[in-house]
Image: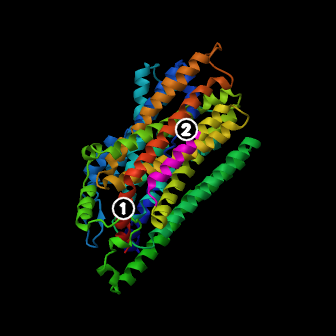
Amino acid sequence: MEERLSLMSSSKWIATVAGIWIQCSVGAYTFSIYSSALKSSQGYDQSTLDTVAVFKDIGSNAGVLAGMLYSAVAVGNNRNSNGNNYCNWGGGPWAVHLAGAIQNFVGYFMMWACVVGLVRRPPVVVMCLFMLLSSHSMTFFTTANMVSGVQNFPHSGGTIVGIMKGFLGISGAIVIQVYDTFWEGKPSIFLLMLALLPTFVTLVLMFFVRIHKSNTANDQKHLNGFTIVALIIAGYLMILIILENIFSLPLWARIFNFVLLLLLLASPLGIAIKAQKDTKKFLETLSLENDPSMENPLAYDELPGGEGQVDADLDDKILSDEEGMNLLQSMCTINFWLLFVAMVCGMGSGVAVVNNLSQIGQSLDYTTMETKNLVSLWSIWNFLGRIGAGYLSDYLLHTRGWARPLLMAITLATMGVGHLVVASGLPGTLYVGSILVGICYGSQWSLMPTISSELFGVRHVGTIFNTIGIASPVGSYIFSVRVIGYIYDEEAKGEDDSCYGTHCFRLSFMIMASVAFLGFLVALTLLFRTKRFYQFVVLKRIKLSLS
């Protein structure tokens, strides 16, 4: 029994569940919940608040240090007696998690202390530092969980990235449910909860997230199980949000809903146990058979394309070079910068929307409850984009041979439509526009890391995709401060520097719609440049791993 528990706790499926639970605790994209308390307690105007928010975006996206730390402690792993790669207890993904937990606690705890008056009101630059620390922790959690997942499931990169990024996206709605159940109406307590909850969960689970490089044909079936559970949780949260918007639920009902949510969050453990049993049976059966397909690797003429024959020796060199590409080498390619510019347009304008949802809702005369629900629903749309784009891009690539940048281009064009819907200012359009923008924004966070791993290799993907992720705070600063913040302050005429009416944000959203269309054109350029690479290199790599 003890041996079985040891084997179970060290499987890639348990590593995936631990990563999912850590992602769920982060509470991403909840700035609007405590931004009003931060603004009033520190005496900020809208531009100053947006400046602080930009440092949140810088921290949550500039994960180069997280990628470098992961490469240092987790890439150089050992090989156990079964031939599976894993990270020993002396160094591995847990070290990245620990660094994130420390930053998370220090940043959020100090912000809570400032808001409640435990410490003197700090200068804006110090508050920006606290915000940077707290949000920077998210890159450490995500890098450790996501890159470990990609290495554990190499031929299902889009799906596992979508799962990890998706649960991160929905974590805001999950944490808000905890907040509503016990401390609704106390935003300062929400800050303290953000300091304690992710730190505790990470410290408990970080040693379970490890690398186990083994590949079986039935992995996708069980990964789809995680996806289904995630969709059920998202649907359940949406129902709760709608009910809370219509009815005033008593305490016992909120506690009952919270317990049911915990049971749903525990369900991935059952999938992991079932997957581990099936994997063991599959490997035992495989060891008794001599698979002749392993002696005849897939030939190039079996791949989709029609663009002519490709030299096999040349392609082997490409595969080798791509697997070993580091950050500096990738930055010397045009594809890197096309991805970067597309993300400035897509991620930057998306973050600008969620950072200003509270003020947008206020200007359009939404109630505080409606604004809070918008933030929660954003987490769900963000989640659906992340998990949906990851699964759909895998499906289209494996079954149709469609390159992932095609889906990136489609989502960026749809995001532009969402910005135009919000700019119209018609009744209810903020809900519709936030759905479109939220789903398309979330899609970029699944597509960009997966495309990076395919174009530049998995060895240093943690550093590379985190570097491209800097595009998000760059775009956020441009659109949140220089566009939305500036135009809002120019339009504000109230005594409290507030603006009311559709004119407050209309021009800003029209500008962001134009930028999203520019991102669509850049993504199309990346598609045309990489279409042949996907047909003759990426597809071959996937089919060989499955054969």
**Secondary structure that dominates the magenta span:** helix
Above or below, comparing residue 90 to residue 477 in the picture: below
Q: Nearer the viewer, residue 473 or 527?
A: 527
Disc on res. 30 = 2
Q: Amino acid at mark 1?
A: Val
Q: Residue at x 27, y 71 (%)?
A: 83
- Image quarter (top left, top right, bottom left or bottom right) of the N terminus: bottom left
Residue 340, by quadrant, is: top left
Q: Position of residue 142 (x, y in %)?
A: 41, 48
Callout 2 crowding tier (Cα within 10 Å): few <14, some 14–19, many ≥20: many
Above or below, comparing residue 407 to residue 111 in the picture: below
Residue wearing tag 1:
538
Q: Nearer the viewer, residue 472 or 411?
A: 411
Q: Measure the C-alpha gap from mark 1 to mark 2.
A: 37 Å
Q: Position of residue 124 (x, y in %)?
A: 44, 20
Provide the secondary structure element on which disc 1 rests. Answer: helix
Disc on res. 78 = none
Q: Amino acid at mark 2?
A: Thr
> Which numbered disc, 1 or 2, marks the residue closer to the eye?
1
Is 429 on the left-hand or right-hand side of 442? Answer: right
- Image quarter (top left, top right, bottom left or bottom right) of the C terminus: bottom left
Magenta region: which residues? 402-416
Residue 3, by quadrant, is: bottom left
User: Looking at the image, is mark 1 or mark 2 earlier in the sequence?
Assistant: 2
Residue 77, by quadrant, is: bottom left
Q: Position of residue 455 (x, y in %)?
A: 34, 53
Callout 1 crowding tier (Cα within 10 Å): few <14, some 14–19, many ≥20: some
